[in-house]
């Protein structure tokens, strides 16, 4: 691999700045000064210690899912089903939290394992639908996301509704021993940060240093020739999706046992879809994922403060991150802007 | 007879299926040219919002449809530009646009939620609407419904019976062969992706201006994905796609009727119908199990049955075409 020049590396700043400018223009269009708007977002994310801890607590499950997605993307798979895998993890953890009466030291590991198993199974179904049923993982994943959300609604309005009656909002709070120990009165559990570190390092090592990682890369680059080299595309597809599902499921468990204290209606609320964006903006590299994910978490938490301050819809945070991913995806690599193969007849002009 | 319960239900299915029919037709055109515009769900949300706001501010539904079509065309242009010119993963571009369209519709439409606005007015076709049974089902609606019928018929004729349609299909099936015959493949792909996107935009506005009336956050969420699945189920044919949209509408109507009949069954079971159906129909048209099933029936029916049950994607769908190079990326 040739070393990228400074311009090539620095270029990625340009689409990011353009995304910020577009967001600023949107603020202006709604008669909010960009200084005030971005100021509210930054204060909302880092204004005091509790806000920063909140950003970190939101970051944990999103990063777990994103790290899993690096694995499935490496194998060339579009695991949109990650959202449902988070939800199923949350449901499995909630099930043990509500029903199992064992000491804390046993209960919490069991919750995490059950969540990983549930996420992996949900992903495995999508994988088998793809390999055996020729149903593209985008459609399989999407359908199973919706089924997982519908299942959640069924549980909290039916069998798991609180004794005072179903409100469609959530189950009763779990007993204390089922919850992860939290840092002060924040929603962040130090244990969950350790999980993220283990996941990042683990996936990095798997993709870097194992034969399986190499197989996944071969599959992702070119499924047909990988098959000729003896890589079983079915086995690798199922395993890659299940590993991703397990990490996403763990993220779901963290959501119910630390961010919330019960199973809620929008238990994931789109974290899985955000994780997909995170991985794209990280150029599918696991070492960058935690940082990009932290930025996303800060923007989204900040935009909630923005809504409180200015009455503007918090979707602005999603617009900022979405535009940024789109522009970096399209224009982030200066080499593809300057030299366009196949456009030799015309002089290639950079478009932006 | 024209007032019977069944006729009324069938007529409402035709009406409800109209936006999906238009969206499916648009995406079918795009994919037949070899491009996958995955952004349908976000495109429909944003254009439903933009169409409603434009119609509300101008007091004209036609301005609304125009703006919605432009929004759809713009998103499609981004997909086409990203995949054809910049050679980026078209799934990635489409997926980001899906989420972005959703967020943009929520943000830009925040001051226009749940307010009454203009809508398409009813227009029965004289004479035709008086035909027993068929009249009220198909010809006693508003102009948008007739637009969908005409659109499907014209698209089918264009695609399968006209010379430009042959070129359109060549772009999706064998671009190098089309190129050898002097067809500018990438220009066609731009053109048909943008036309398809504009139709998807019109479909979005069809919800906010005709079927669901008004704008609220997440108005059409999920329906874009359903449309994408119906394109596959429809075997990339506009007529079969329309049949798919009608079947989808019918199954929803059936679920609603069953829900009224059996209130003791959880509402969950009925909410799950579209997604279970989505998996089942994709399994039906794609899986090897269907092929084995076909092998069982007598030989002379096999070909016909295969035509009905199986579909095949355009061979060069989602691939990059570089003029002068053989093989695909």
Image (tube, coloured by chain):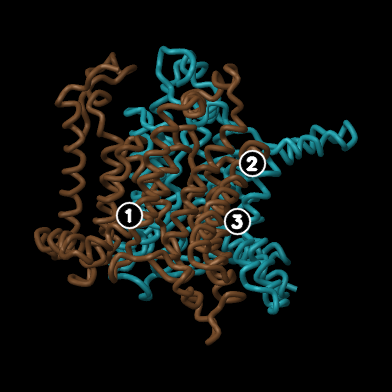
Chain colours: A brown, B cyan
Residue hosting label 2: A128
Q: Nearer the viewer, mark 1 or mark 2?
A: 1
| Mark closest to the chain's N terminus, 1 or 2 | 1
What's the residue at 59%, 29% (across, down)?
Answer: A233
What's the residue at 65%, 67% (across, down)?
Answer: B269
Residue hosting label 1: A59
Depth order, front residue of A278/A20: A278
Depth order, front residue of A190/B224: A190
Q: How far is disc 2 from disc 3 in space, using C-alphas?
A: 17 Å
Q: Residue B150, how many percent across, how many down?
A: 55, 49
The verdict on a common chain for dots 2 and 3 is no
Q: Quadrant of the C terminus of chain A?
A: top left
Residue hosting label 3: B275
Disc 2: CA contacts within 10 A as few (<14), some (14-19) or many (>=20): some
Q: Residue B116, how many percent across, how many down?
A: 38, 75
Depicted B288 relative to depicted B22: above or below: above
Q: Quadrant for residue B79, please give it.
A: top left
Depicted B155 relative to depicted B209: above or below: above
Q: Residue A254, how many percent across, how many down?
A: 42, 59
Q: Nearer the viewer, mark 3 or mark 1?
A: 1
């Amino acid at each position: 691999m040739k070393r990228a020049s400074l311009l090539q590396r620095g270029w990625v700043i340009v689409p990011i700045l353009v995304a910020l400018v577009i967001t600023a223009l949107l603020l202006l269009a709604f008669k909010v000064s960009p200084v005030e708007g971005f100021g509210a977002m930054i204060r909302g994310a880092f204004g005091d210690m509790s806000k920063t801890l909140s950003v970190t607590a939101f970051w944990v499950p999103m990063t777990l899912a994103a790290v899993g997605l690096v694995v499935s993307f490496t194998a060339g798979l579009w695991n949109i089903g990650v959202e449902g895998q988070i939800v199923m993890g949350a449901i499995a953890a909630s099930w043990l939290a509500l029903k199992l009466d064992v000491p804390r030291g046993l209960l919490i590991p069991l919750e995490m394992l059950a969540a990983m198993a549930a996420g992996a199974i949900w992903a495995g179904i999508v994988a088998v639908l793809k390999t055996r049923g020729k149903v593209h993982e985008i459609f399989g994943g999407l359908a199973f996301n919706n089924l997982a959300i519908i299942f959640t609604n069924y549980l909290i309005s039916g069998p798991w509704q609180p004794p005072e009656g179903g409100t469609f909002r959530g189950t009763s709070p779990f007993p204390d021993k089922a919850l992860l120990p939290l840092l002060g009165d924040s929603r962040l559990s130090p244990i969950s940060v350790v999980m993220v570190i283990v996941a990042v390092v683990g996936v990095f090592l798997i993709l870097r240093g194992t034969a399986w990682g190499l197989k996944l890369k071969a599959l992702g680059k070119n499924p047909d020739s990988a098959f000729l080299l003896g890589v079983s595309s079915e086995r690798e597809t199922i395993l890659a999706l299940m590993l991703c599902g397990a990490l996403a499921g763990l993220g779901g468990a963290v959501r119910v046992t630390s961010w919330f204290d019960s199973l809620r209606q929008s238990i994931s609320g789109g974290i899985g879809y955000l994780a997909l964006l995170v991985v794209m903006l990280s150029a599918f590299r696991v070492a960058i994922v935690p940082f990009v994910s932290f930025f996303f978490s800060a923007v989204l938490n900040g935009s909630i403060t923005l809504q409180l301050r200015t009455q503007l819809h918090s979707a602005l945070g999603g617009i900022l991150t979405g535009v940024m991913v789109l522009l970096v995806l399209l224009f982030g690599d200066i080499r593809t802007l300057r030299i366009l193969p196949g456009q030799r007849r015309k002089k290639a002009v950079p478009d932006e | 007879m024209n007032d019977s319960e069944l006729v009324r239900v069938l007529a409402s299915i035709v009406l409800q299926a109209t936006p999906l029919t238009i969206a499916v037709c648009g995406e079918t055109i795009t994919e037949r040219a070899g491009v996958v515009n995955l952004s349908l769900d976000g495109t429909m949300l944003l254009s439903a919002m933009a169409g409603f706001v434009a119609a509300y501010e101008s007091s004209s539904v036609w301005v609304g449809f125009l703006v919605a079509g432009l929004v759809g065309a713009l998103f499609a242009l981004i997909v086409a530009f990203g995949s054809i010119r910049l050679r980026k993963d078209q799934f990635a571009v489409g997926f980001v646009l899906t989420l972005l369209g959703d967020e943009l519709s929520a943000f830009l439409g925040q001051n226009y939620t749940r307010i009454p606005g203009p809508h398409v007015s009813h227009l029965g076709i004289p004479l035709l609407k008086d035909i027993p049974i068929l009249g009220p089902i198909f010809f006693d609606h508003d102009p948008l419904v007739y637009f969908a019928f005409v659109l499907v018929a014209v698209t089918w004729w264009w695609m399968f019976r006209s010379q430009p349609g042959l070129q359109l299909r060549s772009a999706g099936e064998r671009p190098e062969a089309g190129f050898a015959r002097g067809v500018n493949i990438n220009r066609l792909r731009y053109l048909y992706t943008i036309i398809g996107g504009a139709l998807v935009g019109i479909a979005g506005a069809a919800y906010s201006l005709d079927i669901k009336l008004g704008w609220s956050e997440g108005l059409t969420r999920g329906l874009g994905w359903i449309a994408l699945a119906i394109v596959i189920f429809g075997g990339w044919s506009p007529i079969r796609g329309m049949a798919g949209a009608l079947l989808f509408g019918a199954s929803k109507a059936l679920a609603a009727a069953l829900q009224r009949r059996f209130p003791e069954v959880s509402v969950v079971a009925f909410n799950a119908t579209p997604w279970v159906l989505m998996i089942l129909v994709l399994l039906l048209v794609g899986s090897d199990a269907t092929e084995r099933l076909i092998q069982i029936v007598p030989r002379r029916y096999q070909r016909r049955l295969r035509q009905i049950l199986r579909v095949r994607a355009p061979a060069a769908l989602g691939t990059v075409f570089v003029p002068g190079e053989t093989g695909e990326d």
